[in-house]
Image (cartoon, rainbow, N blue to C red):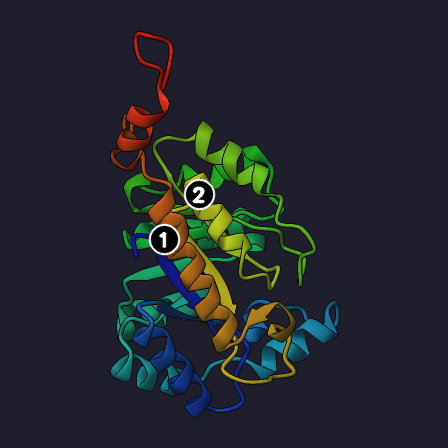
Amino acid sequence: MKTQIICEIGSNWESLDDIFHSCEWAVNHSCLPKLQAWVTDLVVNKDRNPQIYENMSRYELPHDWIKKINKRFPQTFYSVFDLETLAFLETEIKPNYYKIASPDAVYKPLVQAIASTGIDTIVSVGGCTLNEIRGAAKAFDWRKLTLMECNTSYPAKFAYLGNLRDRIIGSKLISWGYSDHTANWVIPAFAVTLGATMIETHFKLKFFDTPDSKHSLDKEAFESMLLLIEQAEENIGTLEHPYPDEIENMELGRRKEDGLR
């Protein structure tokens, strides 16, 4: 498969073993496992957003967990939400990618700090204006940047893939991907036909009642998505007419000099 697939585990876990099994499933399906890492008190005001604070506290990954995950699955990378976590990952983990979530695409301290690492970075730009997208992209070496179109509703009713099409057409120097929140395994294949080079989809190992579970695909649905993406890749190639499998039909179907087939 040419398209890079990110298996976003997010909050779909109840234990470290759940994370291990999810990472194993992702790697066995040639996908990149991804998690989210933060220090809650550096990201959310408890008094202003108590529900978000509670959820993020519940799913804050301990640093010793991250070290154990890295030891077994070094392919795993993280969405980063604060500078302390970034410093930890830079010092202890050294991942191959960083991810910036859509709301933080306009948070300059984090964007600039991640850009300064020189590591390949994925920036989701759901909810961002074109000027905000340009502002985020300016911080990076574009050869190391992938921008991800998405709808930040959870779960999203519509993918609005026309925006992805327009972004790809208008930006030849930056790779574009698509981060899906629709829980529809067909949509990512559509995105690939438009030119997305990377797909991110939330994955759940089993039934979880978590902030991410409603917009996540289970094993069967995720495998269906992968199959559709493979089929999309097979059918978006270009070739001069007539195609090899057309030649015989064209010879039979075209009229001869006497006007007859």
Mark 2 = which residue?
193
Is residue 39 shown left or right of residue 138?
right
User: Residue 52, position in %: x, y?
Assistant: 68, 72
Q: Is 11 drawn above or below residue 182 in the view shown?
A: below
Q: Which mark is residue 121?
A: 1
* Residue at image point 27% right, 84% down: 72
User: Residue 194, position in %: x, y?
Assistant: 46, 40
User: Residue 238, position in %: x, y?
Assistant: 31, 33
Circle 2: residue type: Thr
* Residue at image point 41% right, 62% down: 227
Residue 148 visible in the picture: no
Is residue 195 shown left or right of residue 220?
left
Tags 2 and 1 touching, CB below 8 Å:
no
User: Residue 111, position in %: x, y?
Assistant: 44, 50
Q: Nearer the viewer, mark 2 or mark 1?
A: 2
**Closest to the observer, 225 or 118:** 225
Q: CA distance from mark 2 to mark 1?
A: 23 Å
Is residue 158 shown left or right of residue 117?
right
* Residue at image point 74% right, 72% down: 47
Circle 1: residue type: Thr
Residue 110 visible in the picture: yes
Callout 1: SS: strand
